[in-house]
Image (cartoon, rainbow, N blue to C red):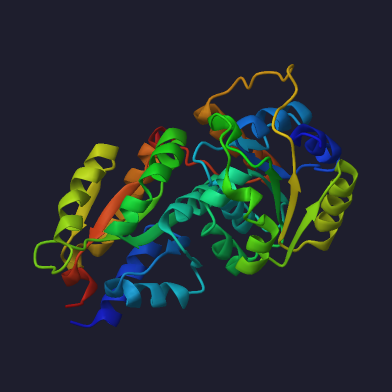
Amino acid sequence: MDAKQHALWIVAGLKKAGIDFVATLPDEKMVEVIRTIEGDPGLKHIPLCREEEGIGICAGAYLAGKKTALIMQNAGFLNSCNALTTTCLQFQIPTLLLIYYAGDMGDRGFTTLGSVTEPALQALGIRYSILRKTDEIDETLCGAQILAEDSKKPVAVLLTKNVLGVK
Amino acid sequence: MMQRYDFLKAIAGDAGDALAVCTGWGAREWWALRPGDGNLKTRTLGLVSSIAAGLALALPHRKVIAIDGDGAFLMNLCGLPTIALQSPPNLIHLLFDNECYEASGGTATASHVADAVALAKGAGYKHATWVKTPAEFRTEFVQTWKRNELTLIATKVEPGQPGDLPPLRLDEIENKYRFMRYLEETEKRGILNPGFDSKL
């Protein structure tokens, strides 16, 4: 497992999907992804203090033509549910949500968070895919972004330890 | 003390083609004073400043005005350091502090003890200042526009608005499309994804 290599693959996938504007709030498991984004001159990186404001920043940037993604842990996804509802869904504004799936099968310490993540996405009507294999990164990220733009809604990709190359 | 409308009226003629992000009663007042498709009315309490910041970052050559209130401002305090970290010079953050949740029934906010200008400065805003009168407000607004650095201009106002404000005749979706089409027109480039049918 090489988290740096996996981060390069994920960020390359984001760029293939057309993403050029990324707001982030770290989970330990996604640090290499965020460092790679920070170091990439082709991506505008906005570090956040709380995930909900990231929805606002991404929504504003989308209105002006940016292709936006928000990278966060699933706790942060829960923090952003009101903004997802009353900004993204109510105005039909897409954004790609890359969510670290804490409490996924095999992940310790966040079982309660893990158990509400998919039901919360379903309740909001946000379509999602769980990314478990590195050879599915490009297809999943590009597909999710096409779906987001075409449906004009947020689409989520849940990132797992395996795909991030972390233990 | 004056109302928000009196202050907005003082700057409406100076706002040119600036994009304006507003909410609640402030939106109706601003639309009445500066009608047009460069106005966006948000729905998520607190996110006016964040949405305006996203626009300002994506359009660094355009002025973006955030018309904020104390309840929303206090709800999104963690948005301030995020904005200050990027420090978009073209973002003019206006705060109308009536010390209550006016649109939610008028109960008190904490802004009679929490100083918004101190909060913005503490978060890293380059400039933040209180003004008292519409004339001072206009002077500060015009200076901010010329200086082109991230600024919060705050003022205490009485709750309330004129009784004869025209209603806003558009929902969120229409507002969004008109705003984006206005940006396409004025930026002279395509923004909205034309969608699947464009290939037929």
Q: Nearer the viewer, residue A49 or B195?
A: A49
Question: Can the viewer see residue A143 in this picture?
Answer: no
Q: Judge by depth and name the residue closer to the eye, A164 or B109.
A: B109
Image position of A134 (left or right of B65): left
Residue A167 located left or right of residue B28: left
Q: How many marks?
A: 0
Q: Residue at x 82, y 34 (%)?
A: B6
Find residue A85 and report its horizontal and vertical position in percent. Answer: 39, 39
Give the quarter of the figure containing the C terminus of chain A.
Answer: bottom left
Residue B185 visible in the displayed image? yes
Quadrant housing the N terminus of chain A = bottom left
In the drawing, does residue B13 fall left or right of residue A64?
right
Q: Position of residue B43 (x, y in %)?
A: 51, 36
Residue found 26% across the figure and 75% down from its top = A6
Q: Give the image location of residue B174, x and y in percent.
A: 54, 27
In this view, the residue farthest toward the left is: A106
Q: Position of residue A20 (x, y in %)?
A: 48, 61
Residue depicted at x 77% and y 34%: B3
The answer to which quarter of the image holds residue A36 is: bottom left
**Horizontal arrangement in the rendering, residue A110 relative to residue A106 (left or right):** right
Quadrant of residue B77 in the image? bottom right
- Give the residue displayed 50% in from the left and 47% down from the top: A59
**Residue B17, placed above or below residue B86:** above
Residue nearest the viewer, comparing B151 with A38: B151
